[in-house]
Image (cartoon, helix red, strand yellow):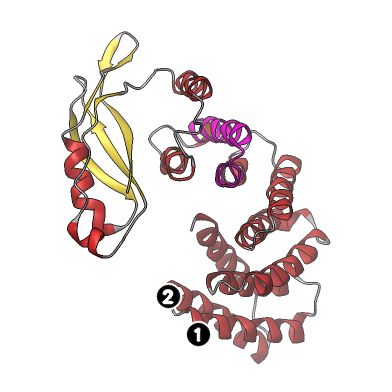
Amino acid sequence: MIMKKLLITIILLTICSTHAQTDEKETLKQLNQKVITSYRNQKFDEALKLAQQAVDLSLKIYGAEQPETAVAYTNLGVMYQDKKKYKESIENLQKAVEIYQEMSASNSKELIATHQILAYSQFLNGDTKESEANYLKSIEVVKSKFGRESKESFLPILNTANFYARTEEDEKARESYLKSYELAKKHFGEESSQFESVSIYVRVYSKSSISTDEIKKNEFKKRYAEIVGYEIGEATSLIRPTYPYLARTQGKRGRIVVKVWVDAEGNVTDAKTVYGDLVFHPEVEYAAKKSKFKPTIKNGKSVQVVNFVTYNF
């Protein structure tokens, strides 16, 4: 959803900057606004129909080589992605990428975002080589236009890390996640939603905290500690939640990630589920609150920290 929220921002910025001088331009502006509204209201069939109309009208007004048409193609690609029509999604997103590639640097952010959305559709379609290529292209564009250490690098590198984790390329995933942590701390801070999102994705997409190899896992923890400046205390007593009756009767399975607030003594003072089906939330939060951690030492003192607990059902 991160990439799609970014896409909607692009739509609003692009369309609002277009001064409607004709009835057709005003109609296109309204169409794009309706696409956004329908999408946000989860009316995906309606959004898809409107997005196709926007493409047709943009081609008529601006032709096949202008940013307005690239935006329309991108939106249509996202709508097809949500409908799980990945081939159609890929076709439209590739057209958008081709338009942006022929344009000036002023459209770099749109090109970066569209490369990532295209890569995700290709991943969902099983085209892993093409998907990796587009994730890496998004990073190349960021590096060229903004610099690898820029805040613009954060999202492309994080999305690439998620790709590598989901395709079980642990080494590449570790390096990309660690880079994401570095960028998040540098540009947004340890308390930011960006920094937290890395921690969540590490637990959502990695099989076992980024590696099933204990040596590699410990190396990851060590390098994470170097980034934040301290080592978070591990769980000494991790309570296993009860399998909710409703989830069992519905045959629900999945991974649940719980954010926990741990005091200086290692006691959990609060817990909130940040990923997973709602049916599991009460039980996992109850179990997490009863868990116990080693105190976290920072600058020689025990401190309060935020940690995460993962449960698999």
Residue neighbourhood size for the residue with mark 2, other residues' Cα within 10 Å, grouped as few (<14), some (14–19), many (≥20): few
Front-lying residue, 209 or 18: 209
User: Which residue is at the far top?
Assistant: 300
What's the CA distance linking mark 1 and mark 2? 9 Å
Where is residue 181 shown, x and y percent of the image?
51, 32
Name the residue nearer the viewer: 45 or 167.
167
- The residue at 76%/69% (across/down) is 95
Pointer 2: what residue?
42
Q: Which residue is mark 1?
A: 46
Residue 109 image position (x, y, % from top left): 66, 54
The secondary structure type at the circle numbered 1 is: helix
Residue found at x 18% / y 58%? 245
Res. 300 in view = yes
Residue 166 in the image: state x and y as whole percent. 55, 47
Q: Residue furthest bottom?
A: 23
Which amino acid type is marked by label 2? Gln
Q: Is residue 228 magenta?
A: no
Q: Nearer the viewer, residue 285 or 151?
A: 285
Q: Position of residue 128 (x, y in %)?
A: 68, 53
Q: Residue at x 53, y 78 (%)?
A: 35
User: Magenta residues: mostly which secondary structure?
Assistant: helix
Instruction: Say above or below: 88 vs 202.
Output: below
Q: In the structure shown, which secondary structural element does the residue marked by tag 2 occupy?
A: loop
Residue 216, placed above or below residue 151: above
Query: In percent of the image, x 62 and y 46: which residue is there?
Result: 156
Q: Is residue 21 left or right of residue 268?
A: right
Numbered range of the magenta stretch: 158-185
Q: Is residue 184 magenta?
A: yes
Q: Is residue 34 visible?
A: no
User: Mark 1: which amino acid?
Assistant: Glu
Q: Say which mark, if any, is on residue 249.
A: none
